[in-house]
Amino acid sequence: MASTISVEEIKALVDAMPGLGWAAWPNGDFICQSASMEEYTGFPSSRFVEREPNSGEFAWSELLHGDDYPRLERAWLDAVGSQGIFDVAHRVRTGAGSFRWLRTAARAQTDSAGTIIYWLGTCLDIHDAVSEMQASKEREKALQNFIDAVPVPIWAADEVGDPLYFNQALKSQVGIDAGDAEHRSSLTLDEVLSKVIHPEDLQSVSEALKAAFAGGERFKQKYRQVRADGSFRWTAGEANALADKQGTIVRWLGVAHDIDDEVSAQTAILEREARLALIIETMPGLLWVSSPDGQPTYFSRQLEEWSGLTIDQIARDDVDTLTAIIEATIHPEHRQEVEATIRRSFETGEPWFRRFRQRRFDGTWRWLEARMEPLRDDSGRIIQWYGLQVDIENEFRAQESLRISQEKLARASSYAGMAELSASIAHELSQPLAAVIMSADACKRWLDSDPPKIEKARHSADCVVRDANLASEVVRRIRALFQRTSEERQIVDINQLVHSVTKLMADELKSSSIRLELDLDSSLRQLSVDSMQIQQVLVNLIHNAAECLADVTDRERLVTVKTSASEAGARVEVTDVGRGIKDIERIFMPFFTTKSSGLGMGLSICETIVLSHGGRIWAENTATGARVLFTLDDQTAEISTKQHPEAFVVPASV
């Protein structure tokens, strides 16, 4: 083949080239290789230029990796045929016997007429770079496998926000494949968003994402996202930029947490809180909330309107809020007791109850009833206190008015019952008066005797004095029934009171063929009571029991009075063998009566008296009649309803 340059000149040129040089004729046959390449591969130059005559295979095929030679040969012959540029990466066996990656490039050298004179090529060792690239791919593949295994929906986008891939969790979540690390998504950002975001949230999410991509800021938003089944669920999306060492954003990574259950739970909580707030604000009471240590933290709207005060108006850093509220709202007579008892409840955790006067927004003092209960967690620790106040001013005044009316009716009842008791009273008086007359006559006879029998006359005179005193005591007791006030409380024997009442009523019971039976506990301790009031209760109950026996003809008419000890003091039972009590739950109501001529106040007055003694009264039907029972409290101190009206107890039936 004719040439304008000699082989020696080409050889010198190849040896002078940096790297691993070689040269070939225009038809592709090799001319030579550089000394450095021969040293690198250990393949002799004499064989480098050889070519199999029949197959045309180049001798240097022995140097190439079996997977690379067909590709490299085809590329070389294509370049020779097209006179184009040859540039191929391939593996070559070195003199040490190992394969390394080389990048081989060649360009045709032409004369002034454009005719190819020879090919000049060079090989660069790129093994380290290829190895690093392969390692990087393997690391990236391992990272992707790791990301796919993470049970958190993750997505990636390029530096401008165009989608790159979804991990397996996100693919399963939305049912859409946006590609993977090796195969870039064919979908644009707007296309992906339109497929996965709820139409009502699409614009806000799109604008927020694009703003983050444009400014390199973090993206964070809640929105509704599609699911594989076509439903939408609330999702919390976040995305951060991934930058290189120079700070240039190279990728965006994001997550999409499913928070639909949390949102639903929060919505339900908000709805419950709204309902609770509505209940609190519409409840017909004055509510407040305090911290575990007793500091008020909340007033309901009704309490603020009623008192004309808010927590913010009272709370100051230098003053205890509870003390400030008590001083600002509670009547001076009740402040000390209210503060002491409520603070004791805060310390002990016990519920609190009080009645006191409190200033209303218009400056008037009104009676309120207040209760407070603690709210505890599962461990029993107090979280906060809830309090409720009710304005009872009108009820209190009505109770006071009723108390006065009951006192008047009690006196009227005593007058009304006087006709029925007159026979018994007359009998009680007739006996001592008859004895007085008899003793006086005897005294006169003893004095008229001759000689006068002074000792016997003196004895008769003593009998006159004794019987006159008995009559005077009967008169005193009867008068006390009609006095405006009852006797002061004193320590008395309840059994003795029972004896005195039954003695007074014995004649009445006997005239009605009623047998009175007493079952008195001799160990019963004495109690502090108003004896006249308790006698009134006993008279009323025994009289009622006797009336219940009026139509009993088939068995003995029997009334039993029994006393026994109770936890508080004493218990008294009056039992009859009549027909039982109808409307037993109403008999203590004022003005309720089953008698055609009754006032309906007897049992109501009895209840008021018993309650004022700290006891209780109730009735029950038995198998053979009925029984009324009441208790008396040994610890009850005398209460002046005029000095302390808040302590006045209204009968439960009222």
Image (spheres, rainbow, N blue to C red):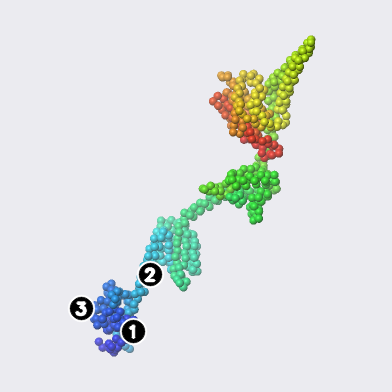
Say left or right for 540 vs 169: right
Of 601 and 423, the residue lying toward us: 423
The answer to whether mark 1 and mark 3 are in CB contact below 8 A is no
Disc 3: which residue: 54
Counting residues from the start of the chain, the first of labels 1 and 2 encountered is 1
Q: Nearer the observer, disc 3 or disc 2?
A: 2
User: Which residue is found at the position 49% from the left and 61% from the top?
Assistant: 221
The quarter of the displayed image where residue 186 is located: bottom left
Circle 2 SS class? helix
SS for tag 1? loop
Residue marked by disc 1: 17
In the image, what residue type sits under mark 1? Met
Residues 204 and 561: in front is 561
Between the C-alphas of marks 1 and 3, the distance is 33 Å
Amino acid type, label 3: Asn
Q: Which mark is residue 136?
A: 2
Q: How far is mark 1 from mark 2, CA to CA?
A: 32 Å
Where 441 falls versus 539 (above or below)?
A: above
Mark with earlier residue (1, 3)? 1
Mark before the other along the chain sequence, 3 or 2: 3
**Dividing the image into 4 quarters, which one contains the C terminus?**
top right
Q: Can see residue 239?
A: yes
Residue 156 screen position, x and y as percent: 43, 65
Pair 1/3: label in front: 1
Q: Quadrant of residue 126?
A: bottom left
